[in-house]
Image (spheres, helix red, strand yellow):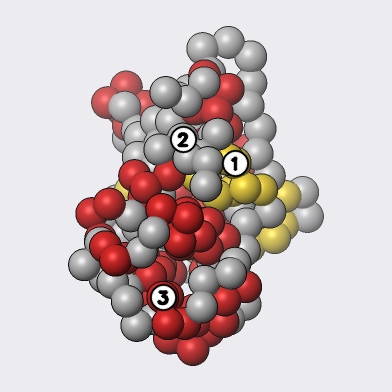
Amino acid sequence: PPSPLIKILTGQLEASTGSVWKHPNARVAYVAQHAFHHIEQHLDKTANEYIRWRYEGGEDKEGLEKATMKISEEEQKKCDTPVVFEQEDEHGNLKKVKLVIEKLTGGRRAGKRGFEYEIKFKGLSMNANKYLKADRLEELGFVKHMKLVDSKVEAREGQYARALTQANVELHLEDVGLDREFGTHNRMAALSGGQKVKVVLAAAMWSQPHILILDEPTNY
């Protein structure tokens, strides 16, 4: 099984002591010790089809169920606590009101001191949305919500680099040494062990990660 360090780096485990920091824009890919774990449910697909399935919609469907992304009941309760905000009334006067943040919309922009995230208030229209600084949202308990937004932004930015087309995936597979005959025209069930490992590596690298974590993958 993966070591605690690997689990913490990949978000499978939350650190019980100390702190873990990851740059909001860092894209991290992971290849498991049992490398075929990533593809064994998709052996009826070609490698090309698998990579296009995995990344369609702009997110990695094989992304780990991260403990660092799961929001506990206690954390959600804190997020549901009403917060005092200044709002303009119909006459343009500022007044203090208590509002509940319903969700982070997925909008993110660069502020003067780090990122700001768009929030939607419960019971109000999208017109009332506003951007809050990361440190303020952290105080209010939205750390994991921000991480989810960050991961989606990272995935989108990786997709913008090149279109998810059969031709582009074919070239990508050839870059790791898998010819189109095996990558596009043969189902993965018919590939050798070494060819399957090439598929796993190619799939992990499609998002153009800054860091690739290899957990002693199957040696071919």
Residue mark closest to the camera, 3 vs 2: 3
Do the residues under discs 2 and 1 have CB atoms within 8 angstroms?
Answer: no
User: Which residue is labeled 2 in the image?
Assistant: 33
User: Which residue is labeled 3 in the image?
Assistant: 182
Please indicate whether residue 157 sits to the left or right of residue 128 in the image. Answer: right
In front: 192, or 47? 192
Would you place residue 119 above or below residue 15 in this image?
below
Q: Which secondary structure lies at badge 1? A: strand
Residue located 58% across and 40% down the image: 214
Q: Quadrant of residue 56?
A: bottom left
Residue located 29% across and 66% down the image: 190
First-in-chain label (1 vs 3): 3
- The amino acid type of the residue labelled 1 equals Ile
Q: Quadrant of the N terminus?
A: top left
* Residue situated furthest top in the rendering: 17
Where is residue 65 drawn, in percent x and y?
35, 40
Distance from the alpha carbon under mark 1 to that under mark 3:
26 Å
Whether residue 210 is visible here, answered yes or no, is: yes
- The amino acid type of the residue labelled 2 equals Gln
Q: Quadrant of residue 188?
A: bottom left
